[in-house]
Image (cartoon, rainbow, N blue to C red):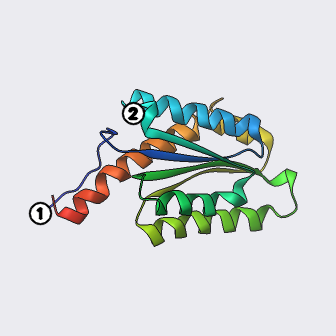
C-alpha cells in the first residue's frame, strides 16, 4: 500500500501569496500570520513573493499568472469579503472561489483559498487571529503540505 503525506517543511520550494487590499486591516493580519507561519516552518524570505491586488475578485487571475510562471510550488490567496459591505457578496465569493480552484486545476499548482467570507466584521476579526486562529497561517501550512504531497503522487514515492 502506498501512503502519501505532505510534510510541513518548505525545503527549496518557492511560495507566492496573493493578497487583496480590500478590507486591508483584516487582510494585513492574514498576511502577517501567513508570513509568520512560513518563517516558523523554515521558509526564507527570498523564497516568498507577495502580490497585492485590489480585492478578492482579482485574486483568481493573479493566482493563475503566478502559477503559470512555473516559479512557485504553491500560491496562497488571501482576502476578506464581508456580506454587510456589499450587495454583490454572493457573486464575488462564488467567482473568487471558482477562479482560485480553476487556477489550480489548470496549472497543477496548488492554489489555496485563504479568503475570509464573513457575515460581519466581528467574524472577520475573529478569523484573522482574534479568537479563531489566523486563516493566513492555515493557508500557508496547507500550501506547504500540498507542495510536498503532489510531487510524491507524481513520482509514486
Q: Residue at x 75, y 34 (%)?
A: 25
Label 2 residue SS: loop
Mark 2–mark 1 CB contact (< 8 Å) = no
What residue is rendered at 36% in x and 30% in y?
42
Image quadrant in which you'd find residue 108? bottom left
Location of residue 141 with respect to 68 vertically, above or below: above
Residue 116 screen position, x and y as percent: 66, 49
Q: Is residue 126 above or below residue 70?
A: above
Q: Residue furthest left?
A: 1
**Mark 2, residue position:** 43
Examine the rendered structure and indicate whether residue 20 appears above or below residue 38.
Answer: below
Q: At which x and y percent is residue 111?
A: 49, 58
Residue assigned mark 1: 1
**Left or right: 105 with respect to 27?**
left
Quadrant position of the N terminus in the picture:
bottom left
Residue 93, above or below 126: below
Of labels 2 and 1, earlier in sequence is 1
Amino acid at each position: 500500500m502506498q501512503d502519501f503525506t505532505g510534510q510541513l517543511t518548505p525545503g527549496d520550494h518557492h511560495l507566492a501569496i496573493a493578497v487583496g487590499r480590500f478590507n486591508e486591516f483584516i487582510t494585513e493580519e492574514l498576511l502577517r500570520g501567513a508570513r509568520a507561519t512560513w518563517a516558523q516552518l523554515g521558509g526564507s524570505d527570498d523564497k516568498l513573493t507577495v502580490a497585492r491586488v485590489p480585492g478578492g475578485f482579482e485574486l483568481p487571475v493573479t493566482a493563475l499568472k503566478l502559477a503559470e510562471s512555473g516559479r512557485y510550488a504553491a500560491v496562497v490567496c488571501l482576502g476578506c469579503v464581508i456580506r454587510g459591505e456589499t450587495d454583490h457578496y454572493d457573486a464575488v465569493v462564488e467567482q473568487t472561489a471558482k477562479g482560485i480552484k480553476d487556477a489550480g486545476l489548470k496549472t497543477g499548482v496548488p492554489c489555496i483559498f485563504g479568503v475570509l467570507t464573513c457575515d460581519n466584521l466581528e467574524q472577520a476579526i475573529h478569523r484573522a487571529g482574534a479568537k479563531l486562529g489566523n486563516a493566513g497561517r492555515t493557508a500557508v501550512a496547507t500550501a506547504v503540505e500540498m507542495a510536498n504531497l503532489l510531487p510524491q503522487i507524481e513520482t509514486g514515492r
